[in-house]
Amino acid sequence: MSEMMTGAQMVLKALGEHGVEHMFGYPGGAVLPIYDELFQQEQLRHILVRHEQGATHAAEGYARSTGKPGVVLVTSGPGATNAVTGLTDALMDSIPMICITGQVPTHMIGNDAFQEADTVGITRPCTKHNYLVQSVDDLSRIIHEAFHVATTGRPGPVVIDIPKDIQFATGTYVPKASVRHKTYHPRVKGDLEAINAAVNLIMSAKKPIFYTGGGMINSGPEACQLLRDFVKMTGFPITSTLMGLGAFPAADDQWLGMLGMHGTYEANMAMHDCDVMINVGARFDDRITGRLDAFSPNSKKIHIDIDPSSINKTVMVDVGIVGDCGHVLEDMIRVYKSRASHPEKDVLAAWWSQVNEWRGINCLGFKEDKNEIKPQYAVQRLYELTKGPNTYITTEVGQHQMWAAQLYRFEEPNRWMTSGGLGTMGYGIPAAVGVQVAHPDALVIDIAGEASALMTMQELSTAVQYRLPIKIFILNNEYMGMVRQWQELLHNGRYSSSYSEALPDFVKLAEAYGATGIRASNPAELDDAIKKMIETPGPVIFDCVVTKNENCYPMIPSGAAHNEMILGSDSAAIAVSDEGRVLV
Amino acid sequence: MTEKQVFSHTIAILVDNEAGVLARVIGLFSGRGYNIDSLAVAEVDGQSHLSRITIVTVGTPMVVEQIKAQLGRLVPVHRVVDLTIEAESVERELALIKVTGSGENRVEALRLSEAFRARVVDATPQSFVFELTGRKEKLDAFIDLMRPIGLQEVSRTGVVAISRGPTPL
C-alpha cells in the first residue's frame, strides 16, 4: 500500500517505521521542512545539541550503549561539514548511524548557493555509504536502504542528503518491507570448513589466547555470552582491544586486561609468545600490533571478521573466517563440542603459570601520594564508588582514556563508549549526552581531560536543557597529557603548545551553565567529593586536580614489539628507534 | 615475511550505474594510496543500469588482495573479478594517433601502420589519424615508432578485458 505525502513527512514516517525514538540535531534553512514536521508530532524526540559535531557523537553514544542506530539531523553546508568528524569517528569504530543533511534546492546545486557544500563529495570517504536524493519518489526507499546498510554487515555511518525542494515535494511513500537491496548482501555465517580448521588449531594449542575487539560489541550481548561460554569451555586466557572492553567480564580469572600500546604486560607478552591466536572481531590495528614484523612471530592465527577487507590487511592469518562473531562462535562451539575428545586442562598448566608470572609484575601499579591525587588513583576510586551494571562510561582521548581503559573494569558490553580508531578529543561529553538519553536512569560518567572536555563543553548546555544528569569527571593536569608524554619521550621534554594555558574555573563554568561544579585537590577529600557527585541529581563537572607530570604506563613505544614494553619511568632509558619516531 | 615484489593486475568491477559510483571507486584508490595504471568505464547493460569498470593496477599480492576486498565493500559494487589470476583473459586497448609529415616520412608512417594493422580514420595532405587496437605493448611500440616520424597527439581508451571461453563472469 503506497501513500502520497511530502518528502519531509516521508522522513518522519520512515524513521518511525525503523523504530527511531530519539534523534540529535540542529536546525537550519535547508532542513526547516523536516523540523516543521518534527514540531507537529510526538513519537520522535529531537534533542537539540549546541554544535553538529555534538549531534554525531551523541548519536554514537546512543548507538554504542543500545545497539540501535544513532540518528542525526543537520542542515546543509556548515551543518554537514561540522558533522564530518563524528561521521569519520563512526566509520573508524563501526558505529551504526544515519545522518540526514539538508541540501540547497536541486536547481541551485552546483551554483555555490548560500550554505551549499558538496556533502556527498565531502562525506564519501568518511561514510559507509551516502546518498543525494534526486527525486522525492526515491526518498523512502533510500531511507530504508540507509538503515539496512548502516546496521548490517560491518556497521557504519550513512549520510542522506536531501535538497530542500524534495522535502517540500509530494511523492509516493514505499514501506520498509518492500525494499530489497540489489548489491549489498553482507555475509554473516562463517565457512564451515574454515571453522573446522580453526577448531583443529584450538584443540592443538598449548599457548593459546583469545584477542577480541569491537566486533564483539557490535555482534550483541548474545554473541558476548557465546564468547564467555567458549572461553570458559576452552580455559584459554583472553584479552581485548580498547573497543571490545566489556564483552568478557573483567572480574573473571581468565581475563588479562586490555592489550596494545597501553595494554597490560601480561596481555602483550601472551600475545607475543602464544602459539594459537583467536582474533574475534578485532582488526590488527597499529595500536595493537606494535612493530608488525615482530608481531606474535610464532603463532598460528585465526581471524573472525564480518568485513572481508579486514582479513590479511596488515597481518597474514592462517585461518580467516568472514562472518558475524556471534554466528561464527555459535558454529565454532558446536563443532568444538562435537569432537570426540578434548585436550586435558593441564595441557595449559605451563602456559597459565607463565601468564601468572607476567601478571605478578603488577604492571598497572603506581606510587600513591599523600598530598596529590594521582590520576590512576582517581580512576580507581571512581571505579570503586560507581561500579555496577547501571553505570556507563564515556571518555575523551588521551592519558585519561588509557587510565580509564586500564583501571575501570567492565563486566558487561555496551557500558564503555570511547573514540578508538579516530581518537577524537571532544567525544566524551556529547557521547555521554547520547547515552543518558537512551538510559535516563543510569549513572553516565565522562572520564575526561581538561583539554578534551573544552572541545565540546557547550554540550553541557544540552545536558542542562534536557535534564540529563551526566557527570563530567575531569582529570585536570593542565596539560594535553598524552602530547606532553610523547614530547617527554621523543622530543627531550620540549613541551611545545601542550600546556593548557588560561583554563577556566571549572566549578564556576559548571555553575554558569546551570550545572553543579565540584572540585577535589587532595586524596583525602576525593571519596566524599565523588559521592557528592553521584548524589547530585543534575549534570556535574568534577574538577579533579591531579599530578601534572604523571605518565601513562605500561607502554609499547612506537616501532617496538610487544615484548619490548616500558613498564614505568623507572625502566632503563627509553630508546625509540628512528623508524619509531615517525610513527604516531 | 611480506612479499615485496609487485605485479600488474587487470580487475573488472561490475557496478550499478548510479550517480557518484566512479568517484567511489577512484576515491578508494587515491584515499588508500593504490595505483591506477589505466581505467576504462562504460555502461554495458542499459536496461539494468550496469557499468563495467576495468582497472589495471600494480601492487604486492597482499595489496592487490586488499584492493579487491575494499572494492567489494563498496555498496553499489556487484562483482569484482581479477582477470589476471581468476581467468585466462583477452585484453585490448584502442588508441587514436595523429601523425604529421610529408614525403618519405608520410610513406613510412603508412607502411608501418599496415604492418601494425592500424586503420587510417582521417587523412589530410599533411596528416593521418590512425586507429589501432591491441595489447598495451603493441600500442606502445607503434607510438614509439611514430615519434621520430612526426607524432603529434595520442588518445587511448585504457585497457578493457574479458575472460576467454564460453562462461561469463
Image (cartoon, helix red, strand yellow):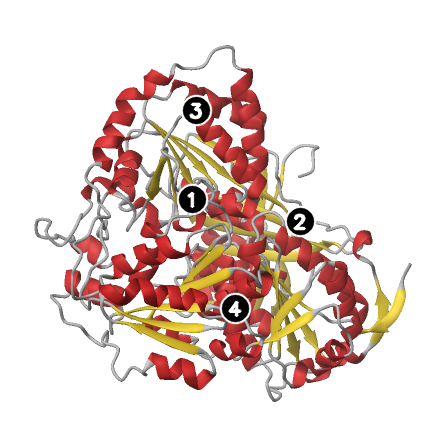
Q: Chain of mark 1?
A: A
Residue at image position (79%, 56%) is A176
Type of amino acid at the residue the image marks with label 1:
Lys
Q: For the residues marked 3 and 1, what is the alpha-carbon distance in whole angstroms? A: 28 Å
Label 4 neighbour load within 10 Å: few <14, some 14-19, many 20+:
many
Select label 3 or label 2 by which is in front.
Answer: 3
Q: Chain of mark 4?
A: A
Image height check: is B2 above or below A438?
above
How many numbered tags mark residues here?
4
Type of amino acid at the residue the image marks with label 3:
Thr
Report whether mark 4 lies on the same chain as mark 1. yes
Type of amino acid at the residue the image marks with label 2:
Tyr
- Residue closest to the far bottom: A114
- Residue contact at pointers 4 and 3, CB within 8 angstroms: no
Q: Earlier in the sequence, mark 3 or mark 2?
A: 2
- Residue contact at pointers 4 and 2, CB within 8 angstroms: no
Residue at image position (47%, 50%) is B57
Label 2 neighbour load within 10 Å: few <14, some 14-19, many 20+:
some
Query: Which residue is label 3 attached to?
Result: A234
Is residue B78 toward the left or the right of residue A232 in the image?
Answer: right
Q: For the residues marked 3 and 2, what is the alpha-carbon distance in whole angstroms? A: 36 Å
| Residue B39 visible to the viewer | no
Q: Earlier in the sequence, mark 2 or mark 1?
A: 2
